Image (spheres, helix red, strand yellow):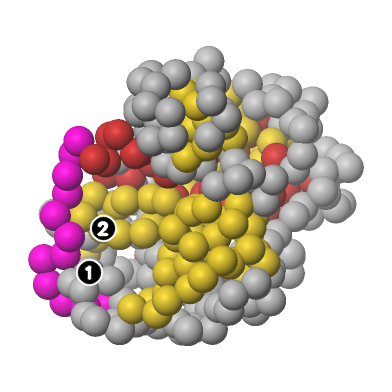
Amino acid sequence: MCAWDEDSTTLALDAARLALGDGVEVSSITVVSRSQSYLLDDAQVVIARALRLDDTVRVTQIQGAGCDALLALAAAGPGDLIIAVDSVGAVGAAAILVSGDPGVRVLAQRRHSLPARTRAAGDAETATYDDARLMRERGWRPAVDALRGEGEVAVTGLPRSVATRLGATYPDSFEDPTEPSWAALSAAAALAGGPGGRLIATDGASAVAVEIVPTTTEIRRGPRAPHEAVAVVAGAGIPLSLAAYERAFDAKVGLYAGRCVCGESFFPPRRYCPACGRADEMETVELARSGSVYTVATIRTPVPGMPREYSLAIVDIDGADVRALVHVTGAPPGSAAIGDHGKLVLRRIAEREGVPDYGFAFLNEAAK
């Protein structure tokens, strides 16, 4: 379950950071998602900025599901970061960074149409042909039979119970949602880091089969405890100022400070230095994504579009002489205390007129 300040973009960034580790250079990002509106919302820009990647890194977007995620992985080369994201239904994300040969070979594809849903406004989906037997017998079974080959085969994109009925395996290391693209990418990582073998990803009546060679790929998943549902105050919310959004975007999403030639540092960066009065003589400084609480307050006055209670903290950034005002995340309001140390993580700090506004929040090291 996502907290009020998490969404598919923050989950995608978490997955990407787990895949990257330390000191790995990224040459390209490929984002795969079924949702067209998600790809149109420039979420990939938020991800790239939060990873502090420059504009020379190629970004590709693919509208698709598990089949397309596996095809993108098979075509990837060293330095390519593949991120599969789902923003509706089973919201989630998975990422794989390719450091050499991805060890994924496309064996066969099957393209077949079996309409299963109609779309209403935006991403709303209304199932109108919800016939489980028809999907199993005319969609999944022919796809798996056509691509099965010899020996054992694992599948993703269909229910575990159906996989067993069709004579395929659904290893315990696989995620269980039936359609999302991130489940297929997670399954590929599980096989690459384990026994290897043949994997079939289904998307409706279509499917793709790949052979995965075992590698030394480390599968890293962050410990994620479920969050309790948080009531959000009804109302119009905080209006969007496009000028303020644009001006603060890089500093908030990338966590950058400004440092004047006189030595004073500021977050967010400023054009004029309050200390010496110089203009346009600031350099950009990357801030550490960790710090300690200098002071904290809990807001209990209802604010439309925000939780009924939430905490704000001023955090001393590690290794810098600046402080940042941030939300507290991953813990009940009022639980953070002065001196607590933790990480700064990207979160959706507000939604203004339907536009998600991202920034960093304080996640206490002691939070479970």
Query: Which corner quadrant of the image does residue 192 belong to?
Result: top right
Is residue 91 something that shows in the picture? no
Which residue is nearer to you in this view: 298 or 354? Answer: 298
Question: In screen coordinates, is 206 left or right of 101?
Answer: left
In this view, 140 is above or below 97: below
Majority secondary structure of magenta residues: loop
Q: Where is residue 79 shown, x and y percent of the image? A: 69, 25
Residue type at mark 1 is Gly
Which residue is nearer to you in this view: 334 or 60? Answer: 334
Element at badge 2? strand
Q: Residue furthest top?
A: 56
Magenta stretch bounds: 231-243
| Residue under the point 14% across and 55% down | 239
Specify the label residue 351 is tagged with: 2
Which residue is nearer to you in this view: 45 or 282? Answer: 282
Q: Dot 2 surroundings within 10 Å: few (below 14), some, or many (20 or more)?
A: some
Q: In which quadrant will I find the C terminus? A: bottom right
In this view, 330 is above or below 90: below
| Residue under the point 58% across and 24% down | 28
In this view, 362 is above or below 187: below
Specify the label residue 43 is tagged with: none
Question: In screen coordinates, is 285 left or right of 205?
Answer: right
Q: Where is residue 34 shown, x and y percent of the image? A: 38, 46
Is residue 365 something that shows in the picture? yes
Q: Earlier in the sequence, mark 1 or mark 2?
A: 1
Q: Dot 1 surroundings within 10 Å: few (below 14), some, or many (20 or more)?
A: some
> Which residue bears the numbered disc 1?
305
Circles 1, 2 touching at the beta carbon (< 8 Å): yes
Q: Where is residue 308 shown, x and y percent of the image? A: 29, 82
Q: Where is residue 68 shown, x and y percent of the image? A: 50, 37
Asked whether residue 20 is drawn in magenta, I would say: no
Question: In screen coordinates, is 303 left or right of 80?
Answer: left
